Amino acid sequence: GCSFLKITLVKLPSSAPLSFVCVFNLSCPPQNASGRDDLNEAEPPRKLVLEKNTFNQTKLSNGTSSMISAKQRAASNSYETQKEQCVKYFDQWTETDQVEFVENLISRMCHYQHGHINSYLKPMLQRDFITVLPARGLDHIAENILSFLDARSLCAAELVCKEWYRVISDGMLWKKLMERMVRTDSLWKGLSERRGWIQYLLKNKPSDGILPPDSFYRSLYPQIIQDIETIESNWRCGHHGLQRIHCHSETSKGVYCLQYDDQKIISGLRDNTIKIWDKNTLECKNVLTGHTGSVLCLQYDDKVIITGSSDSTVRVWDVGTGEMLNTLIHHCEAVLHLRFTNGMMVTCSKDRSIAVWDMSTSTDITLRRVLVGHRAAVNVVDFDDKYIVSASGDRTIKVWNTGSCEFVRTLNGHKRGIACLQYRDRLVVSGSSDNTIRLWDIECGACLRVLEGHEELVRCIRFDNKRIVSGAYDGKIKVWDLVAALDPRSPAGTLCLRTLVEHSGRVFRLQFDEFQIVSSSHDDTILIWDFLNVPSDQGDGSQSAPRTYTYVSR
């Protein structure tokens, strides 16, 4: 409540640490009789000079440090007596009256005093809610808050105090963290199934029916991280276990296509058959016959297998029994590739056309539209809800609207025919007989990167969020760093992580996940490259003898 404030800036010599000193003259009006008029009745206006290091730190009663002048802390003789009297009255009032009084008191203070009040109140307003909530019977809220922490933060939280450690342990938060990772990360999900600790997560019951304590999950977590780091290292260094399936017959040479899951591998061969293999025993479980030409492409789901052949037909088979359910006759030359999902199928052919089909059931498949525009055989197609993407021997990639089937744009850049591609989100990755791989932005048609390294035609290509894996007629499989390839600053020489050489013939098809690559070749073999279960002698650079199985037709 100052009625007069005069500020004078005094210029100091240029050598002084501060260029100016602020001189404040404060004149305060006399207090009324009911206030503390005896404290400043005879005091003249006070003069305060603010200089460097004028103030000293003073501890407040709540432990908070505050910058308070030693001169300001000198109290008058009657201050203590009057303070006790004020506190006595204050304690007799209701909470509402107390708040109103304090608000009135604060409103009479200057900004400088407000700062000291704020420093005093700030630590008083802080709460250790993780400790307070369980004390009020709200353990589940504290557990839910901490359940959003990552592993590093959860480790730090355990060290805060015993109560935090108890909340984390009783709430099984390490178990919940692992369950969240399994639900959101395919690597964690696959590892949990392969290592067997999935039985301790989610709603599964362990074999002995007893759920382990949180300390079990706390000790398991670093083992999982070590497993993941080992897998990544094996990919970078090329360390792998190897299994080999010999699937040739007397009249054929070549495995043109394949697809696999955890239980089986389904392959299409040059001998006109589809062979189904047990992925664990490597034994042939079934042979599907009906095509009169080589099986060039296939795809299956949990109900049907659909195959395309050089006999110009597309055939539908029951995935469980192997029974042929339907034959589609439309293309006039070899069916080179096909994809299907969500009631829609797209096929492409050596006859230069692309056929779009509606699939109601396995026996009710109707032709919706034929797309023409390529000037040579259409070797590969892929699609999602937005675009159909096709690649041809005419060196171009064409983009079509999935809903209307209208042409959108052409991607130009390859110098020779294109043999393979994959499309997902905005990214298209293609391989060509010009021996290169190109990465494209489908929305603008720009080529983002050219990968060079293969010595012959790049026949097959797949990518995920981390890697591109390609196979070529030079018999080699190359693993590329996708993240680095999308960064224009990355040097071209650093993009190929590893070259795998085991096939003795052209690589026709491959598929991969976080743990393995499965590839097929003109050498009549299917190879399973295992980056999880690696022989111990791989670290020394030696190769273990591969496990093999040979199928001989009868």
Image: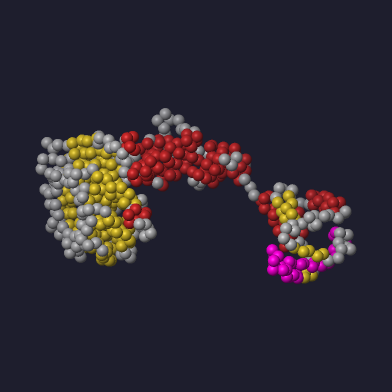
Q: Residue 22 location in percent, x, y?
A: 74, 67
Residue 103 appearing in the image: no
Q: Find out whether residue 21 is within the magenta segment.
A: yes
Q: Find out whether residue 112 is within the magenta segment.
A: no
Task: Count all numbered tags in the image, as a single digit.
Answer: 0
- Residue at the image position 36 percent from the left and 60 percent from the top: 488
- Residue at the image position 83 percent from the left and 50 percent from the top: 84
In the rendered image, the quadrant that contains the C terminus is top left
In the rendered image, the quadrant that contains the N terminus is bottom right
**Image height of 422 relative to 32, above or below:** above
**Image height of 269 relative to 27, above or below:** above
Q: Residue 416 location in percent, x, y?
A: 20, 61
- Residue at the image position 36 percent from the left and 51 percent from the top: 466
Extent of the magenta region? 7-36
- What is the basis of the colouring in this image? secondary structure
**In this rendering, would 48 be left or right of 128?**
right
428 vs 523, nearest the viewer: 523
**In this rendering, would 123 be left or right of 222?**
right
Q: Residue 70 location in percent, x, y?
A: 78, 55
Q: Residue 396 location in percent, x, y?
A: 23, 63
Residue 284 appearing in the image: yes
167 vs 304, nearest the viewer: 167
In the figure, residue 53 lies in which quadrant? bottom right
In the figure, residue 540 lies in which quadrant? top left
**Image height of 372 relative to 73, above or below:** below
